Structures are given as C-alpha cells and as structure tokens.
Amino acid sequence: MYKAKALDFTVAKLEGLWWFDEKQYGAVTMEEAPQQIPRSTWEYRLLIRLPDFVQEADVLNARELAYQKKAIPGIQEVTYYTMEEGKVVQMLHVGPFDTEPETLLQMKAFMDAHNLRRNGQHHEIYLSDFRKTAPEKLKTILREPVK
C-alpha cells in the first residue's frame, strides 16, 4: 500500500511485551519468572514497529483486506498500538530463550546497583528468526522499563 505511494519501508524486527498475573503469582522477580511461572499462563503482545507516516486507519484497512483475501486466523486481533516506554535497562542476550534468566540476573544486578526499579512490562526484540537460527546463535534484546 505504501510502496504505491513511494513510501516503501523495511519491516522491523518482531518485538514482544510479556507479563503475568502478579495477583496470582505475587512479587516474582524478572529473573525468576521464566522458571517459576508456567509459559501457558503468560500474557503477551507481539509488535512490529512502524514508521510515523503509517496511520491507524491504514493498519485497520490492511487488516480487513488481508482478512477478506485470506481469512487468516487471528488477524482480526491486529490493532494499532502506541507505546511510550521511557527509560529502560537493556542487554543483548545471545543463546536460547531458556537461558534468558542468566542475562536477566545481570540486568537485575545493574538495576540494584543503580537503584532502579521495574516500571512496566518486560520487552523483547527478536533480532534472529528462531525458525531459521540455531538456538545457541539466537540474538534477543531484553529490555526492562525502569524508574
């Protein structure tokens, strides 16, 4: 749609916001959560960053056209989402997803040393395609909003 308007752009990397029910699981720390909370109970929002010129109406129109053309399951759940994240601590994690707690421990140590507290949902940016990359070579930016 934008290519026809001479506003072509490269699709950004997949991102994800992750959270769990803190009322149910209590004050589990970020580095403990992946091991203590069953993956099936986590909530998430998958994101693809868009250029500023892409408008909400365009996203909703593209969603409707895609649904009419292919009836892809779940496509009706696609929405336009604006996010203001603010200050974060982030680190590049190299390796399989199940070793992320090791990187999260390093991030927590940094946060503790600088008197920073968690202030939002855990955020991941997937630099590698897990379908095509060996687990030990996966690259993921782990990001924690802080205050």
Image (cartoon, helix red, strand yellow):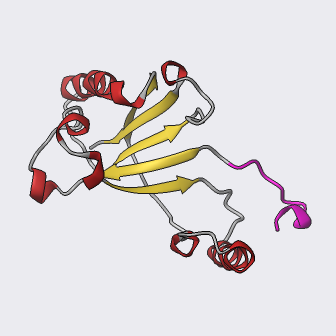
Nearer to the camera, 44 or 89: 44
Q: Is residue 26 visible?
A: yes
Horizontal side of 76 relative to 5 (left or right) equals: left
Residue at 57% across, 46% down: 14
Horizontal side of 131 relative to 95 (left or right) equals: right
Nearer to the camera, 123 or 90: 123
Which quadrant of the figure has residue 80?
A: bottom right
Nearer to the camera, 79 or 95: 95
Q: Is residue 9 magenta?
A: yes
Q: Is residue 120 visible?
A: no
Residue at 67% across, 60% down: 52
Measuring from the top left, give residue 141's x and y in whole percent.
47, 33
Q: Is residue 143 magenta?
A: no
Which quadrant of the figure has residue 103?
A: top left
Measuring from the top left, give residue 77's x and y in whole percent.
51, 72
| Majority secondary structure of magenta residues | loop
Which quadrant of the figure has residue 102?
A: top left
User: For the magenta stretch, what is the residue range?
Assistant: 1-11
**Number of numbered tags placed on the structure image:** 0
Picture layout, residue 30 above or below residue 135: below
The quadrant of the image that shows the N terminus is bottom right
Residue at 19% across, 34% down: 32
Horizontal side of 5 relative to 70 (left or right) equals: right
Measuring from the top left, give residue 54's x and y in whole percent.
69, 66
Residue at 26% across, 44% down: 147
Nearer to the camera, 42 or 61: 42
Measuring from the top left, give residue 126's x and y in whole percent.
53, 38
Horizontal side of 96 relative to 14 (left or right) equals: left
Picture layout, residue 90 above or below residue 103: below
